[in-house]
Image (cartoon, rainbow, N blue to C red):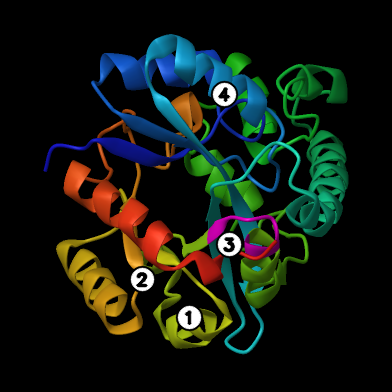
Amino acid sequence: MNSAADLHCHTTISDGSDTIPQIVAEAQKAGLQFIAVTNHDTTRGLSQAFSEGKAQGITVIGGIEISAFDFKRNRKVHILGYGLQEDSPYVQALCNPLLKARNLLSHEQLAVLREHGYPVTAQEADGYSTDSRVLYKQHIMQVLVDKGMTDSVYSDLYYRVFKNGGIVSRDICYVDAADAVDAVQKDGGYAVLAHPGQLDSWDLVPELAEKGLAGIEKYHPDHTGTDCLRAQELAVQYGLFVTGGSDYHGNFSKKPVCIGSYGCSEEEMNFFYKWQAEKPAGRKK
């Protein structure tokens, strides 16, 4: 499938390694018509993205990826929001505590790593979080890569210390997925269930559809052909549009992907805009 749009891209404003100008330039090189900037839990930088897109001849869709949770099934859920502006008060009111909690946790994890002999200082790690203003695990790992402790951010070392009961294996408390959908709508945007195949969030679709879920991510690096088919079937069943994207994080991507390697076709983007026109009630003011 030839992609016209990559609707899932991260930058240095969250846990990506590329700046906004860099990802827009890559989208232009890839021949894309649309790109969505979907940084974790923040809409900061979207005004710059709109300007960069205009200069490069790319339509930039303002977005976000909210760190949410399905408390009924006890699993993580990611909610993408599209059609947002940099000043999105409901979304940011919901997400600002997440950013503070993540920054605090990451610095606590860094301190524990130092106690166990890992040579990484707060100053070194914070050097990678200048744009994000939040320290992420990827920034800590990049310092360890720089010092030759490991060969990549998502190496065996990452999974040994940050996951699977490792010495800094812990997480923040996320927001309810329904609250994330609601906040996106209140800011005039459209909520989309991100990579349900990756997080096994299929069972949540009917409940979120009742809350105003607008779409479902069909194409993603972690989705199999079966996942894509299931997403399409749920989209038809619940009147959702489908999206897709590379989940691009630059050098911090878990899988080697390029902008535009996963995304929507022009026909699917047309359906997205058709859905917008036919369901104006889906947007709350």
Image x and y of residue 127, in percent: 76, 16
Image x and y of residue 9, in percent: 46, 36
Numbered disc 1: secondary structure:
helix
Q: Point out the stretch of residues depicted in magenta.
A: 185-190
Image x and y of residue 70, in percent: 61, 79
Q: Answer yes or no: do the residues labelled 1 and 2 have beta carbons within 8 Å?
A: yes
Q: Give the Cα separation between the discs numbered 3 and 2.
A: 35 Å
- What amino acid is found at the position of numbered circle 1 in the picture? Ala
- What amino acid is found at the position of numbered circle 2 in the picture? Leu
Q: Answer yes or no: do the residues labelled 4 and 1 have beta carbons within 8 Å?
A: no
Q: Earlier in the sequence, mark 2 or mark 4?
A: 4
Q: Answer yes or no: do the residues labelled 4 and 3 have beta carbons within 8 Å?
A: no
Residue closest to the eye, 148 or 198? 198
Mark linked to residue 164: 3
Instruction: Point out the residue furthest to the top here.
Output: 55
- The local crowd at label 2, few if under 14, some if 14 to 19, many if 20 or more residues have their Cα within 10 Å, is many
Q: Give the Cα separation between the discs numbered 4 and 3.
A: 37 Å
Q: Give the Cα separation between the discs numbered 3 and 1.
A: 33 Å
Q: Which residue is mark 2?
A: 240
Mark linked to residue 209: 1
Reply above or below: 213 against 147. below
Mark linked to residue 49: 4
Numbered disc 4: secondary structure:
helix
Q: Quadrant of residue 40?
A: top right
Residue 19 visible (yes or no): no
Tag nearer the camera, 4 or 3: 4
